[in-house]
Image (spheres, coloured by chain):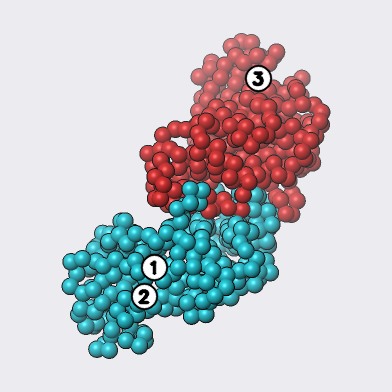
Chain colours: A red, B cyan
Amino acid sequence: MSDAAYVAVDWGTTSFRLWLISQSGEVLGERRSNEGMTTAMQTGFPQVLASHLSALSAPSGLPVIICGMAGARQGWVEAGYVDVPANLAQVLDGAVRVMGETSDVRILPGLAQRAADKPDVMRGEETQLLGALSADYRSGEQLVCMPGTHSKWVNVANLEVTGFSTFMTGELFDVISKHSILSHAVADAGSFTGDSEAFRTAVSQSYSNPQMATNHLFTVRSGQLLHGLSATDAKAKLSGTMIGLEIAGAHSAASKMAQVVLIASGSLGALYEAAFNALSIDFVTIDADEAVRRGLVAAANAIWH
Amino acid sequence: MSDAAYVAVDWGTTSFRLWLISQSGEVLGERRSNEGMTTAMQTGFPQVLASHLSALSAPSGLPVIICGMAGARQGWVEAGYVDVPANLAQVLDGAVRVMGETSDVRILPGLAQRAADKPDVMRGEETQLLGALSADYRSGEQLVCMPGTHSKWVNVANLEVTGFSTFMTGELFDVISKHSILSHAVADAGSFTGDSEAFRTAVSQSYSNPQMATNHLFTVRSGQLLHGLSATDAKAKLSGTMIGLEIAGAHSAASKMAQVVLIASGSLGALYEAAFNALSIDFVTIDADEAVRRGLVAAANAIWH
């Protein structure tokens, strides 16, 4: 690993991903674990980082660039927020150096929207945005969807973030599945995909009538009582209702000129693609893992050019 | 208690209420406990009933009329459903006798809406409706709101239920308060009333933009991070968001000719009154406890006249 030039880390609430990168931006090694902020608050951020670098036999003293919750108040070192509207390049300028480390460790700031009626924050997604958009979307308007526990929808124009909104879709799906009366309806559910008719119908109904969302959720239960809805269809319907509601909120408020860009990976990305197709919304997909790595590489290049 | 003519019981999922009633409909004694269906499934329905009758020194052999979850499949004896559209008098005809009891014990059926796209059920609320409407609302259209864990909104015309919708408002408020990231925001919250500006603003925002519901929920968190929103205001905002979303769904679909009738009691009733006032929706309130007792009395009179 003697070609290694620096280390890039995406440090989320519950996930940790690290890449060893060469001067030319090539990936020399990779580590993934669940040692997110929540774990690292207990075991120590420097210790988690050191253990993964050691596992890759990385040379000592490499500079490290980090994005995500490691920069939160309860993280390693608070990296603050850049206020929107902001050009994505401003994020690079706001990196905070971790003092007391022998190597040059920097944490990127998040973005904050301080408007009184729509306060919002993100950490990590700004780096995904940078990586996803800076190569192919330097101009024009984009409406960027980054689905997850707290889905982010971001309005971008010429690489400037003009505003964004967080929707609690993934967390609400999880909490309702586990702790509400619907937990009985989805118990023993199998896996489903975006091909599920129950999923697609729920997306469309929720998008068309978002005001009925908490009634649509109850019909997951009553549909099982009266119509024998299967557990798998119940889960698909719950998922589709939450995703359709999110898209109704995010898409209805957006400029119709904006290109919808989905930054996602894996099965969750496939569900959103199916949802957009069910709603006849044009979109392009960018891989989320690749986007955040490219964003970290761009930050490293800017800082240590 | 020798004047007692019969016993009336409202047997919910988590609550039990019993009244000893005279021939003329006068209340001679009352019992309340948390021995709802969930508890009675363990300890036995006949045992729970007997213990409360004994506590009131009720004469043995009195007939008993019951509404609510005691008639569910997992209750004492399944009392089925009357399908809507249905006249409320049909509920009285559907009472099921509990076999094997020495006294005449009858359980009223619920209502079911079997339409493929909006399956729905209620148990207990049909008896509240009967008690609330049969005296003063024998004609005309009403849109009846019965708030709670699973709020019911019922379209009634000339005492016929033409349709209804359940909204999971109370349960979602509870689950989100306890199990989501917002649990931190509402921890240590004090009590609030319908006078709360945070509550009224959230009701209006959610009613006007229901598609933004899960974003409004996130601003409970981000409002605390960026604007120092207090825990009490956070809780009021969460409540107002959920109630405003429910009213948007129920009211937007309803006939504008219908009189809105709120059947509720206590602090929850007061919150809905404040919400309707914030939205300039005309309404009348009927006390929920009184309504269900009057409904049970009407049922007893019809069965044992």
Q: Looking at the picture, does residue B20 appear above or below residue A84?
A: below
Point 32% across, 68% down: residue: B95
Tell me the quarter of the image containing the N terminus of chain A.
top right
Subunit of mark 2?
B
Q: Which mark is residue B91?
A: 1
Residue B122 occupies quadrant: bottom left
Determine the secondary structure under disc 3. Answer: strand
* Cβ atoms under marks 1 and 2 closer than 8 Å: yes
Q: Nearer the viewer, residue A228 or B69?
A: A228
- Image coordinates for residue B219, horizontal then vertical, percent: 65, 51
Task: Place residue B291 in its image quadrant.
Answer: bottom left
Which residue has dot 2 on it? B299
**How many residues crowd around disc 1 within 10 Å: few (fewer than 14), some, or many (20 or more)?**
many
Q: In this view, does B57 lie to the left or right of A282?
A: left
Of residues A264 and B1, the one drawn nearer to the viewer in this rendering: B1
Q: Residue at x 34, y 59 (%)?
A: B80
- Marks 1 and 2: same chain? yes
Judge from the rendering whether residue B159 lies leftward or rightward of residue B251; answer left or right.
left
Q: Where is residue A116 in the image (x, y as percent from the top left)?
A: 74, 54
Residue corresponding to mark 3: A6
Gap in Å between the C-alphas at discs 2 and 3? 79 Å
Residue A166 falls in which quadrant of the image? top right
Label 1 and label 2: CA atoms lie apart by 9 Å
Q: Name which residue lies at 64% across and 59% down.
A: B252
